[in-house]
Structure formats: C-alpha cells, structure tokens
C-alpha cells in the first residue's frame, strides 16, 4: 500500500489506519532531527542583541550544564526559545508544547511561562507590567521559573561567554526525545526539584 484508500476519514478501513499508524511512528522518530534543525536556524533569528538566538540558547544550556543541572534542565535551557521562529507572540507556549511529553512537568511549566517571568527585567521600559508573574505566585513551580530566568535566561547574552556547541548537547536532546511520550516516571507531576 502506498497510500490509504479514502478521501474522507470516515471511510477509512482498519487496514488504512494501521498503515497510517506505521507512517506516524517514523514521522515521530524524526521529531528530534526537526527540533535540532529549528535550533540551528535560530542563528538567523532576531537581530539587535549582541548574540544570536542560537548563541543565547547555547549560553543558557552551557550555564545550566556547568551549574550541574540535570538533563531535563539542560535541554529545557537549550530549547527554551525555539518558539521564536514560528510563534514570536507566544514563543514560550510553543517550546512548552514541543517538550511537554518528554520532560518533567516542572520544566514544561517553566518553558510555558518564562516569557511572562522575563518581563520583570525589561517591560517597564516599554510601558508594561513587570510584575505580571505575580499571578502565578501560588504555583509550586514559581520559584523554579524565577531562578531559571535570573540564572539561565536574562543572564545569557554575553558574546564573550565561552559556550559549548550544538554537538555537545545533541546526545542529551536525542536522549530526551527517545523517551516514551507522557511517561509519568519522566513527567513526575507535582514534583518540585528546582535549580541546582
Ligand atoms: Fe524566551
Ligand atoms: Fe531566552
């Protein structure tokens, strides 16, 4: 079979859907390669800072790694801005959606809200509310997001910082995306580990 028999989903047979399930798995297996391509493409994203978006991401991940952070944190730091390419208005949400099935819930939460938490550093210069993060004060992950932004995000824009290349982090990214999606032993819902 090269393609399914139907032109409307409701007409598909069991054979059609079993055929598609196999295709979907090989597509899923290629996710990590596509994520790494998007990461590399950040080199051409967003001008004006002293480092490219890729440089910022590598500095962030290198800082996390040198602080002794575990693999979930390092990959979170590395990929936290991949959403900039397709979702500049809600880049944090896109990164969280990509990583949520594969990392600790704590890290996915930090990914989801880091854009809001980052505002404390600059948004008053643009007439916004720097304390927008306060609405999340009751979250168990609040402090982790505060720390992530302070230590590995707002601080990761120095062009003289000696960071590791993508190749250094690639095995970690591959390990994370090789996990069984939505595995509760990985997600560890509600567990607060925090930054090292
Ligand atoms: Fe960001
Ligand atoms: Fe960032």
Image (tube, rainbow, N blue to C red):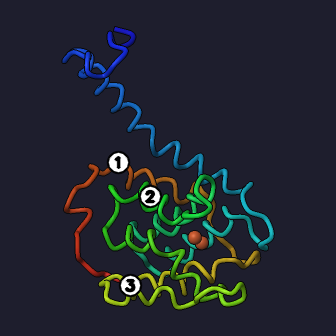
- Name the residue: 60% across, 63% down: 89
N-terminal of the two: label 2 or label 3? 3
Residue 178: mark in rendering: 1
Front of the two marks 2 and 3 = 3
Please state, as top left, top right, bottom left or bottom right, where the C terminus lies in the image.
Answer: bottom left
Label 2 sits on a secondary structure element that is helix
Q: Quadrant of residue 137?
A: bottom left
Along the viewing direction, whichever of 20 and 123 lies nearer the viewer: 123
N-terminal of the two: label 3 or label 1? 3
The residue indicated by pointer 2 is 172
Residue 136: mark in rendering: 3
- Name the residue: 23% across, 69% down: 188
Q: Vertically, is 133 above or below 160?
A: below
- Real-space CA distance between mark 2 and mark 3, rounded to the nearest whole angstrom: 30 Å
Where ligand 2 lies, by quadrant?
Answer: bottom right
x%, y% of residue 155? 63, 83
Label 1 sits on a secondary structure element that is loop
x%, y% of residue 16? 27, 16
């Amino acid at each position: 079979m090269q393609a399914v028999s139907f032109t409307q989903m409701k007409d598909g047979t069991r054979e059609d859907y079993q055929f598609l399930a196999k295709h979907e798995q090989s597509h899923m297996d290629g996710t990590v390669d596509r994520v790494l391509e998007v990461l590399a493409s950040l080199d051409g994203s967003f001008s004006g800072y002293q480092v490219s978006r890729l440089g910022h991401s590598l500095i962030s991940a290198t800082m996390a790694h040198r602080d002794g952070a575990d693999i979930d944190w390092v990959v979170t730091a590395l990929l936290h801005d991949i959403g900039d390419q397709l979702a500049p208005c809600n880049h944090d949400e896109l990164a969280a959606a990509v990583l949520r099935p594969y990392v600790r819930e704590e890290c996915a939460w930090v990914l989801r809200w880091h854009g809001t938490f980052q505002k404390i550093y600059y948004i008053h210069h643009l007439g916004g509310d720097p304390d927008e993060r306060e609405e999340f004060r009751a979250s168990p992950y609040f402090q982790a997001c505060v720390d992530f932004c302070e230590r590995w995000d707002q601080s990761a824009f120095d062009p003289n910082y000696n960071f590791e290349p993508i190749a250094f982090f690639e095995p970690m990214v591959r390990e994370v995306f090789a996990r069984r999606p939505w595995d509760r032993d990985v997600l560890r819902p509600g567990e607060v580990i925090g930054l090292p």
